[in-house]
Image: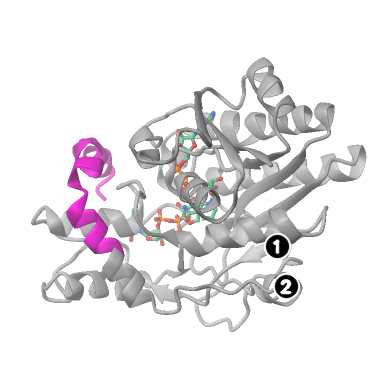
Amino acid sequence: MRQLVTGGAGFIGSNYVRHVLAHTDHRVTVVDKLTYAGNRASLAGLPDDRLMFVQGDVCDAPLVGDLVADHDLVVHFAAESHNDNSLRDPSPFLQTNLVGTYTLLEAVRAHDVRYHHISTDEVYGDLELDDPARFTESTPYNPSSPYSATKAGSDLLVRAWVRSFGVRATISNCSNNYGPFQHVEKFIPRQITNVLDGGRPKLYGAGANVRDWIHADDHSAAVLAIVERGQLGETYLIGADGERDNRQVVETILTLLGRPADDFDHVNDRAGHDLRYAIDWSKLRDELGWRPRYADFGEGLAATIGWYRANADWWRPQKAATEAKYAEAGQ
Ligand code: NAD
Ligand code: TDX
């Protein structure tokens, strides 16, 4: 099996590449544009004989066509992925998330190659804080931000290509990931590295917004289960029962790092900030027998903190520029 993994130098894509190389005998080609979010160092130390790296843009149709023709499966992670950036400048989100997905779909259609589309629970909008409901595969789409609107649009393109052209595809919508190699712009690494730098965590608004956390290793294992055993044309939600409000997460990080749990700042809230995400992942459990391995968020978070402490060389070059952008927004 030859897998083409787009966005494989990013946070979750690189985790998936490590997972596939460790758990299968597949060969992997990564195609990644190496935007500010991509980092070759996230793929360091992996076996050269089974991993090839191509620097390229998923919107480049001739390149994508040539690569897709040589593979049995495409797993599409590449995206502009950060909500706050999409509020500052939506344009790369429309290009990569919509045109990039369209370009891949046309290539897998032309070459009849199996396709898996990586998406997010944010396509469903948000839930009220006191609502016992969780998202399911049949929750109506209702995205809030330019990021989530482009991810929703890309999912709908996949569904249309399945129905209209018989493309052999599956979709997964996962909740918030954490773990090593996540860019310091994202919530958990930002707070860990702020504290490691002697600063304070920054909570948007009151910090009551809820996210449903899953370790990236669990996300990767679920994606591999779907590409190996999922039903063509189906969508699977991926989650791990990890609901926490942002304030609780910051308090846990501070405590794990030996600082007082209230040693954080409240900063400007995000425009249109989604209140709560929560995933019902029973379809994945019942149909594919998948289960998360990281049952204990505190343990996963402690290991993640240990990784950021030991790998400042990886994140340090991005930190100052990331914080400068936040400072401009009063965040
Ligand atoms: P990331 O920002 O860490 O990585 C994105 C990668 O895509 C980078 O390596 C970047 O260089 C590459 N890329 C961007 N534009 C490209 C282009 N035009 N052509 C080729 N490569 C390009 O993102 P992530 O957090 O790893 O997210 C990966 C995927 O998972 C995305 O599709 C995202 O929507 C989805 N997702 C993320 C989360 C999460 O919590 N981070 C949750 C659910 C779903
Ligand atoms: O400094 C911060 N302070 C803060 O309170 C940052 C960066 C974020 N937040 C809040 C906003 C959210 O409620 O923390 C929560 C998580 O924020 P992000 O890490 O930006 O994630 P989110 O917006 O929830 O989106 C993430 O999960 C779904 C990923 O970035 C998306 O790619 C994925 O689709």
SS for dot 2: helix
- Residue kind at label 2, given as amino acid type: Lys
Left or right: 145 in relation to 74: left
Residue 174 screen position, x and y as percent: 58, 60
Q: Is residue 99 magenta?
A: no
Q: Residue at x 27, y 38 (%)?
A: 325
Left or right: 105 in relation to 315: right
Indicate which quadrant contains ligand 2.
bottom left
Q: Which mark is residue 236?
A: 1
Q: Which residues are magenta?
A: 304-331
Quadrant of the image occupied by residue 209: bottom left
Q: Is residue 305 magenta?
A: yes
Q: How is the image coloured?
A: one colour
- Look at the picture and state if 15 lies above or below 138: above
Q: Residue furthest top?
A: 62
Main structural element of the magenta stretch: helix, strand or loop? helix
Q: Is mark 2 within 8 Å of ligand 1?
A: no
Residue located beneath label 2 in the image: 283
Q: Nearer the viewer, residue 115 or 19?
A: 19
C-alpha gap between disc 1 and disc 2:
7 Å
Q: Is residue 319 visible?
A: no
Left or right: 319 in relation to 47: left
Residue 60 screen position, x and y as percent: 62, 19
- Look at the picture and state if 50 lies above or below 59: below
Q: Nearer the viewer, residue 143 or 218?
A: 218
Residue 179 screen position, x and y as percent: 37, 59
First in residue order: circle 1 vs circle 2: 1
Mark 1 in CB contact with mark 2 (< 8 angstroms): yes
Neighbours of disc 2 within 10 Å: few (<14), some (14-19), many (20+)? some
- Residue kind at label 1, given as amino acid type: Tyr
